[in-house]
Image (cartoon, rainbow, N blue to C red):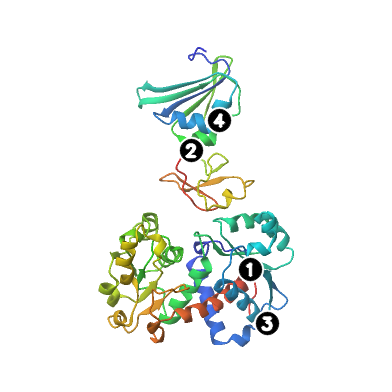
């Protein structure tokens, strides 16, 4: 039985295969509209999420399957103190596959011990969110036609941003990757991420505190939010916040082939004026999330078309 | 207790100096009824200084704990005053309910019946991580 807890559970060959199916779904969605007929996806969201849950549900419905589940712990037996293991033992009798989000790190690992159906981790606290990374990889592949030989800039909160850590872990397995790490000193990439996925693999990287000076070199700019609450004092926040806001002015210095990505939700780190720039692909990225989840659900259920 | 003569029990020898107390704690030796001797900073030809633990009692000893704290330690089994066995120590792949995850965001912090399991993720650096949240053990 297949499960997906961490993006690194998938080999690059498996990721390539999922991307190939997702590309085919994008090209011909009709072909897949009954691929998962009579199959049920349970979306167990122990904490609220709009995008991820709806993306999973839309993916299953587009495959002709059905969905059931809950969107917050208060509307499940977890509110009565039921353990994750017991909830999963029950739900795996009602569904063919489970996508779960939980605020506690490692909750999907507990789910595996009791589930009789495949488990997809739809986010466990600040730990892993593999389908976001799959979404990011499909976006890069679809927009730029490759996952290798790329200069990838990641910008904003690199310290706490799990999407950035997972993306770096996944991209570091492809050849010709170079990173530009753009953040305030306070929010630098944690040393263990840098060591394990960049330095140990001999991948070239540069660090910068200034987006403006490096944007011109990038193929990908992956933006994340710099949150006020991450700073020790208001003064530092006010001093730094504008350095990491992407504006039309900054975009003028970027390559015509740049792609700007963002896991969303965006607050103010990308000016809305940038949205109409064809290089801004974050809303397309959210759409790709549905297609890669369709490919993943099919794969985990052993369905082919 | 004469620490030089164990009748039936164990001598954990060649423990790296300073690691003896951690081993004492993780093996739960404070809870034993039998005599336990802890020798710290003993002179060693091979190691310079070493710690030694002598347990004068026939107990179940968790070799994985010893392998985690110091795989270079040696374990001598004593029966009726004689050395009857020298046990091999290997670095354990997994530790169950020996280390406890301190990450407040880990699922083990709220689901308290879950076993705390740490797995060896880097043999060279001997790094163990919680199987649930990947937090590094730093005992």
Along the horizontal axis of the image, is A265 left or right of A66?
left
Q: Which residue is mark 2?
A: B68
Disc 1 vs disc 2: Cβ atoms closer than 8 Å? Answer: no
Name the residue located 40 percent from the left edge and 30 percent from the top edge. B18
- Please, what secondary structure does the residue beneath circle 2 have? helix
Foreground disc of the pair 1, 4: 1
Disc 1 vs disc 4: Cβ atoms closer than 8 Å? Answer: no
- Residue B78 point in image, percent of width and height: 55, 19
Name the residue located 63 percent from the left edge and 75 percent from the top edge. A57
- Please, what secondary structure does the residue beneath circle 1 have? loop
Cα separation between marks 2 and 4:
14 Å
Of pointers 2 and 4, the one earlier in the residue sequence: 4
Q: Quadrant of the C terminus of chain A?
A: bottom right
Question: Same chain, marks 1 and 4?
Answer: no
Q: Nearer the viewer, residue A53 or A296?
A: A53
- Please, what secondary structure does the residue beneath circle 4 have? loop
Question: Same chain, marks 3 and 1?
Answer: yes
- Please, what secondary structure does the residue beneath circle 3 have? loop
Badge 1: chain ID: A
Along the horizontal axis of the image, is A99 left or right of B123?
right
Q: Which residue is mark 3?
A: A34
Cα separation between marks 3 and 1:
25 Å
Cα separation between marks 1 and 4:
44 Å
- Residue B65 point in image, percent of width and height: 52, 35
């Amino acid at each position: 039985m297949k499960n997906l807890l961490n993006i690194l559970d998938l080999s690059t060959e498996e990721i390539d295969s999922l991307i190939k199916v997702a590309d085919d779904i994008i090209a011909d969605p009709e072909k897949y509209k009954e691929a998962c007929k009579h199959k049920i996806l349970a979306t167990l969201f122990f904490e609220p999420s709009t995008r991820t849950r709806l993306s999973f549900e839309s993916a299953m419905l587009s495959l002709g399957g059905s969905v059931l589940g809950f969107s917050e712990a208060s509307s499940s037996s977890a509110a009565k103190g039921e353990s994750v293991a017991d909830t999963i033992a029950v739900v795996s009798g009602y569904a063919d596959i489970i996508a779960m989000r939980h605020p506690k790190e490692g909750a999907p690992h507990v789910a595996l011990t009791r589930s009789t159906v495949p488990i997809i981790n739809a986010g466990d606290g600040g730990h892993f969110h593999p389908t976001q990374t799959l979404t990011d990889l499909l976006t890069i592949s679809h927009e730029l036609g490759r996952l290798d030989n790329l200069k990838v800039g990641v910008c904003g909160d690199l310290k706490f941003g799990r999407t950035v850590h997972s993306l770096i872990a996944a991209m570091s397995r492809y050849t010709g990757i170079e990173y530009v790490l753009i953040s305030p000193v306070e929010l630098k990439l944690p040393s263990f991420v840098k060591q394990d996925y960049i330095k140990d693999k001999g991948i070239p990287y540069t660090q910068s505190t200034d987006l403006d000076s490096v944007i011109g070199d990038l193929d990908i700019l992956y933006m994340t939010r710099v949150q006020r609450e991450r700073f020790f004092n208001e003064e530092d926040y006010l001093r730094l916040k504008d350095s990491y806001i992407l504006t039309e002015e900054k975009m003028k210095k970027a390559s015509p082939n740049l792609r700007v990505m963002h896991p969303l939700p965006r607050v103010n780190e990308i000016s809305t004026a940038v949205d109409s720039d064809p290089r801004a692909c974050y809303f397309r990225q959210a759409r790709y999330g549905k297609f890669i989840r369709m490919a993943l659900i099919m794969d985990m259920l052993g369905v082919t078309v | 207790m004469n620490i030089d003569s164990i009748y039936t029990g164990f001598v954990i020898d060649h423990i790296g100096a300073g690691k003896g107390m951690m081993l004492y704690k993780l093996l739960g030796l404070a809870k034993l009824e039998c005599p336990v001797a802890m020798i710290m900073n003993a002179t060693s030809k091979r190691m310079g200084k070493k710690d030694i633990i002598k347990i004068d009692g026939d107990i179940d000893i968790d070799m994985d704990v010893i392998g985690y704290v110091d795989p270079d330690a040696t374990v001598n089994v004593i029966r009726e005053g004689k050395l009857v066995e020298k046990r091999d120590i290997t670095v354990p792949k997994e530790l169950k309910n020996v280390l406890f995850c301190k990450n407040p965001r880990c699922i083990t912090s709220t689901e308290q019946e879950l076993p705390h399991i740490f797995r060896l993720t880097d043999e060279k650096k001997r790094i163990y991580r919680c199987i649930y949240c990947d937090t590094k053990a730093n005992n």
